[in-house]
Image (tube, rainbow, N blue to C red):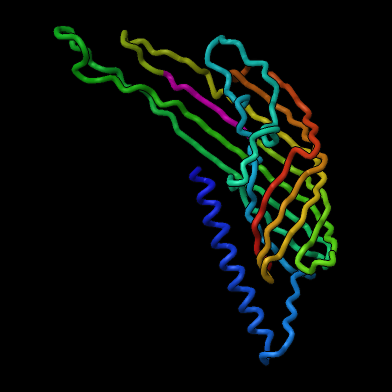
C-alpha cells in the first residue's frame, strides 16, 4: 500500500512538472499572442535519455544462491534459477534501476543499464566466557564468533533500438534487442573458535562459496509517449527472451566443485514501466 501511495505521488509530481515545462516551451517559442506553437518531441541524433525503470529486478538473488554448509553436510544439488522473470510477481511500484540511451541517428539508439551491490563482513574470533560455578550462569558472558561473508551482485545489459514515427507526434514505438549479463556470488568463512572446555575447533579450512553466472539475448518492443518536450513515460516488453545460467558450489578448498546449469526461455513474460528525461 505504501509503495502505491509513493508511486502515485511521484506520478502526480511528474505530471505537474511536465505541464509546467510544456508551458515554458510554448512561451519561449511564441513571439506574439497569435503565433502557432510547434514543439518537436522526437529524439534526434546526439540526444541522450535517462529513465527510471519499474518492474521486476534483474539481480540473481534467488533462494538457490545458498552457500554449502561446513563439515560433511551434503552439498545441495539445486540448479541455478533465473529469478528475474516471474509469472505472477511483477510490481510496477518497484524501482529497479536506471537506463540510458544515446541516439546515434534520429531513429537508432544504443542503450545500457545495470547495477552492482557489494558487501563484505570480516570475521571476528569468539571470546569464551567465565562461568559462575557457585550460582550458575556466567561471571563474564561469552562472545560468539562472527563469520566472514562476501556478497556480490552485478547485472549489466547492452542493447539497441530502432525508433518508428507515427501520426501522433508524441508517440514513438520501437523494437530492438538486448544482451543481458548477470553475476552473483556469496562466500562464507567460519573462523576457528574456542569451546567451553578450552578446545580449539576448526569448522572451515577455507572459504565456502557459491556463484551464478548468467547471460542471454532478448527481443524488445516498446513505446514512449512524450507528455512534454523532454519528459516521457513508456512501456517495454520482451516478446522473446532466453537466459543461460551456470552455477558453481564449493564446500571447501581442495574438494570438488558441484556445477549445474539451466536455460530459461520466456515469451511475453518480461515487461517494464519507465519514466524518463531527454537531454
In percent of width and height, residue 124 lies at: 39, 28
Q: Is residue 83 above or below residue 67?
A: below
In percent of width and height, residue 228 lies at: 67, 69
Q: Is residue 75 above or below residue 150?
A: above
In percent of width and height, residue 188 lies at: 52, 26
Q: Provide the residue span drawn in magenta.
A: 184-192
Q: Nearer the viewer, residue 48 or 36?
A: 36
Q: Residue sitting at 55 percent across and 24 percent down?
A: 207
Q: Main secondary structure of the magenta part?
A: strand
Q: Relative to residue 244, is residue 275 drawn left or right?
A: left
- Residue at far bottom of view: 32
Q: Relative to residue 254, is residue 139 drawn left or right?
A: left
**Residue 158 included in the magenta stretch of the image:** no
Q: Indicate the quadrant where residue 10 lies.
A: bottom right
Q: Residue sitting at 46 percent across and 34 percent down?
A: 121
Q: Nearer the viewer, residue 166 or 198?
A: 166
- Residue at far left of view: 134
Disc tally is 0
Q: Residue sitting at 65 percent across and 64 percent down?
A: 277
**Residue 187 included in the magenta stretch of the image:** yes
Q: Indicate the quadrant where residue 38 lies.
A: bottom right
Q: Indicate the quadrant where residue 276 lies.
A: bottom right
Q: Is residue 149 above or below residue 14?
A: above
Q: Nearer the viewer, residue 50 or 196?
A: 50
Instruction: Please identify the quadrant where the C terminus is shown.
Output: bottom right
Q: Residue sitting at 54 percent across and 17 percent down?
A: 69
In percent of width and height, residue 87 lies at: 70, 32
Amino acid at each position: 500500500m505504501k509503495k502505491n501511495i509513493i508511486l502515485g505521488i511521484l506520478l502526480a509530481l511528474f505530471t505537474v512538472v511536465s505541464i509546467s515545462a510544456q508551458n515554458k516551451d510554448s512561451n519561449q517559442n511564441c513571439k506574439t499572442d497569435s503565433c502557432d506553437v510547434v514543439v518537436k518531441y522526437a529524439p534526434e541524433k546526439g540526444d541522450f535519455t535517462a529513465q527510471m525503470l519499474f518492474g521486476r529486478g534483474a539481480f540473481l538473488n534467488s533462494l538457490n544462491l545458498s552457500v554449502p554448509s561446513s563439515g560433511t553436510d551434503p552439498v545441495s544439488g539445486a540448479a541455478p534459477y533465473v529469478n528475474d522473470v516471474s509469472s505472477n510477481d511483477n510490481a510496477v511500484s518497484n524501482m529497479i534501476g536506471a537506463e540510458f540511451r544515446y541516439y546515434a541517428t534520429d531513429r537508432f539508439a544504443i542503450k545500457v543499464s545495470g547495477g552492482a551491490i557489494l558487501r563484505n563482513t570480516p570475521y571476528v574470533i569468539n571470546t569464551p566466557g567465565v562461568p559462575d560455578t557457585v550460582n550458575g550462569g556466567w561471571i563474564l558472558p561469552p562472545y560468539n564468533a562472527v563469520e566472514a561473508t562476501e556478497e556480490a551482485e552485478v547485472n549489466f545489459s547492452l542493447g539497441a533500438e530502432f525508433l518508428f514515427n507515427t501520426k501522433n507526434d508524441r508517440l514513438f514505438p520501437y523494437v530492438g534487442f538486448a544482451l543481458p549479463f548477470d553475476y552473483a556470488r556469496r562466500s562464507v568463512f567460519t573462523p576457528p573458535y574456542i569451546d567451553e572446555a578450552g578446545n580449539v575447533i576448526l569448522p572451515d579450512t577455507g572459504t565456502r562459496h557459491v556463484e551464478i553466472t548468467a547471460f542471454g539475448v532478448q527481443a524488445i518492443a516498446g513505446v514512449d509517449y512524450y507528455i512534454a518536450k523532454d519528459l516521457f513515460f513508456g512501456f517495454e516488453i520482451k516478446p522473446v527472451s532466453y537466459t543461460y545460467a551456470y552455477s558453481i558450489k564449493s564446500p571447501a578448498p581442495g574438494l570438488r566443485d558441484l556445477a549445474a546449469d539451466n536455460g530459461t526461455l520466456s515469451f511475453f513474460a518480461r515487461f517494464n514501466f519507465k519514466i524518463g528525461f531527454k537531454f
